[in-house]
Image (cartoon, rainbow, N blue to C red):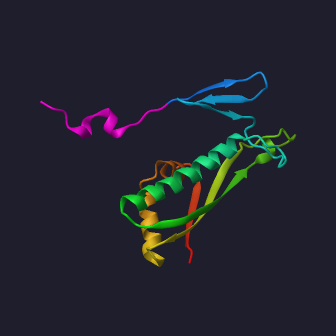
Amino acid sequence: MSKNIGSLYESENYSTSYRGILTREEGVKVFTEKNYMEVDSEVEFDIKKSHFSSLDYFSSSIIGGILLNLKKNFNRENILIDDLESKIELNLKNPLSLIGVRGYNEKPEISSCRITIYMYSELEGEKLIEFCKKSLDKCYIYNTICNAMEVTVKFIPTI
């Protein structure tokens, strides 16, 4: 008797793993299956620093995952999408605790995430916005962060 595909672990789960090591330079190398990323700090308050922080990678993966999800869903439905652009703003609560300011011991956290997405498509107005909102329902990164913090996404069709 063949198994129902819905009862297979792999049909409902995808597991992945990464390995991280602290380097002699006090950074962290995070190894993927094919390459690695270097992280030099949890969050970087020095705007002149050129290395990526954990917050940079976190923000990049959120916006990257959402934009790629939108593109995939537009392509799946054969709907033209052009000029997909976005902006992400994260609010870090209690940042002084991160840098060890005396008297600040509150737990630091990302309390909110605001994303604005600009796009041009053959869909217009409310039809475009509704399609994008439905696409977000299929985005694992979006669904995950919504459970952890306040997330707002604003879609702005361009002309």
Give the image quarter of residue 137.
bottom left
Task: Relative to 42, say whether 21 is above or below.
Answer: above
The answer to if 3 sits in the magenta stretch is yes
Q: Which quadrant: the N terminus?
A: top left
Please state the horizontal and vertical placement of residue 103, each as a whole percent of the image.
85, 42
Task: Relative to 155, say whether 32 is above or below.
Answer: above
The answer to if 6 sits in the magenta stretch is yes
For image coordinates 15% across by 32% down, the residue present is 2
Please state the horizontal and vertical placement of residue 121, each as a whole percent of the image.
48, 71
Task: Relative to 55, say whether 27 is above or below.
Answer: above
Q: Is 43 placed left or right of 158 in the picture?
A: right
Q: Residue furthest right?
A: 102
Q: Which quadrant: the C terminus?
A: bottom right
Which stretch is magenta?
1-16
Q: Is 6 placed left or right of 135 in the picture?
A: left
Please state the horizontal and vertical placement of residue 155, each as a whole percent of the image.
54, 68
Q: Is 94 placed left or right of 59 in the picture?
A: right
Give the image quarter of residue 51.
top right
Please state the horizontal and vertical placement of residue 50, each as a whole percent of the image.
79, 43
Q: Residue furthest left?
A: 1
Give the image quarter of residue 131.
bottom left
